[in-house]
Every structure is written in structure tokens, then in C-alpha cells.
Image (cartoon, rainbow, N blue to C red):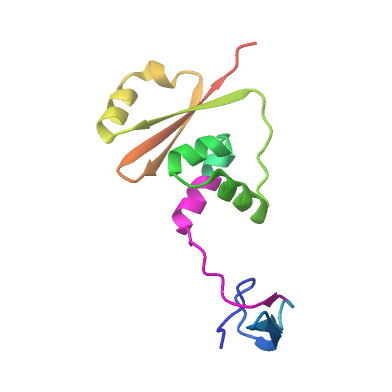
Amino acid sequence: MIESCPNCNSEEVIKSGIIKNRQRYKCKKCSYYFTVNKLGKKIDDYYVNKALQLYLEGLTYREIERILGVSHVSVLNWVKKYNIKRPYSGNYHPTYKILSASELSKYFQNTENLYKSGVLITELGDKFMMIKWERFKD
């Protein structure tokens, strides 16, 4: 017997017929019909959170795909699933670099690198990603 609904994780599941020789189930809580647990490749929540952070920082789906190694379609689906809205701001443009700890330290030693910009550092395994916003000059 199926233990929980793949849609809402409720344990209130009942049998609901057979489709193509497979047992069909219905969730009493959300009325979701399903035949088996979703088995597909589960992506670690760490990557989901990182992808959504990078999306909010202004990176495109394809840039996120290149950085994290996760399909841009998955990122798009997560943005839709969690109803993420990116605040529109045409005054800033993000650029990013992947740096080691020593490279990051050298970068911050030069204060001119931080002038008239915002910087965010996020960990990516053994490296760090630095996202920098520079104000467009009018």
C-alpha cells in the first residue's frame, strides 16, 4: 500500500480502482489521484534553494544551469511551484564570478572592487560565488 500522497504528503490515501493493470489511489485530503509514488530523480533541497536564490539575484535560468549543473527547466518549474516573483529593477545589473577562498580574499583586499556596488557571497561546494551589482551609468 502507498504510504502517502505525492502531492500533499497526507497519509489519508484510499484505493480508487485499477488503471492499465496498476492500482490507482486517491488522497482524501487534496483529492489527488495517482498510481504510484513519484520515483524520479530527487534533487537535493540545497540545490533548489541555491537555484531560487540565484534567480532572485537576477541570473537567468541558463546561467543557473551552468553554475549548479541543474536543468534550466527544473529551475523554471521551481520558480513556478514556489511562486517566486523577481523584483523588477532596471538600475542594477548582476555579474558573477566563481572564486576559491584565496581568490576571494585577494579580491576583497582591493577596496576599489567594492566601490558603487553591492556584493553577495554564497558557497558552492569548495568554491564561492560572488554576485556583484553595479549601478548603470546614465
Residue positioned most to the front:
20
Please tell me which residue is depicted at 68% across the width and 44% down the height of the picture.
Answer: 85
In the image, 22 versus 5, the foreground residue is 22
Q: Position of residue 92 (x, y in %)?
A: 60, 24
Q: In the image, is residue 118 above or below residue 30?
A: above
Side of 100 relative to 65 (left or right): left
Q: In the image, is residue 121 above or below residue 1?
A: above
In the image, 32 versus 90, the foreground residue is 32
Please tell me which residue is depicted at 67% across the width and 51% down the height of the picture.
Answer: 80
Magenta highlight range = 32-52
- Residue 33: in magenta span: yes
Residue positioned most to the right:
31
Side of 80 relative to 48 (left or right): right
Residue positioned most to the left:
102
Q: Position of residue 67 (x, y in %)?
A: 44, 38
Quadrant (top left, top right, bottom left, bottom right) of the N terminus = bottom right
Quadrant (top left, top right, bottom left, bottom right) of the C terminus = top right
Side of 118 relative to 15 (left or right): left
Q: Quadrant of residue 100?
A: top left
Residue positioned most to the top:
138
Please tell me which residue is depicted at 57% across the width and 47% down the height of the picture.
Answer: 75
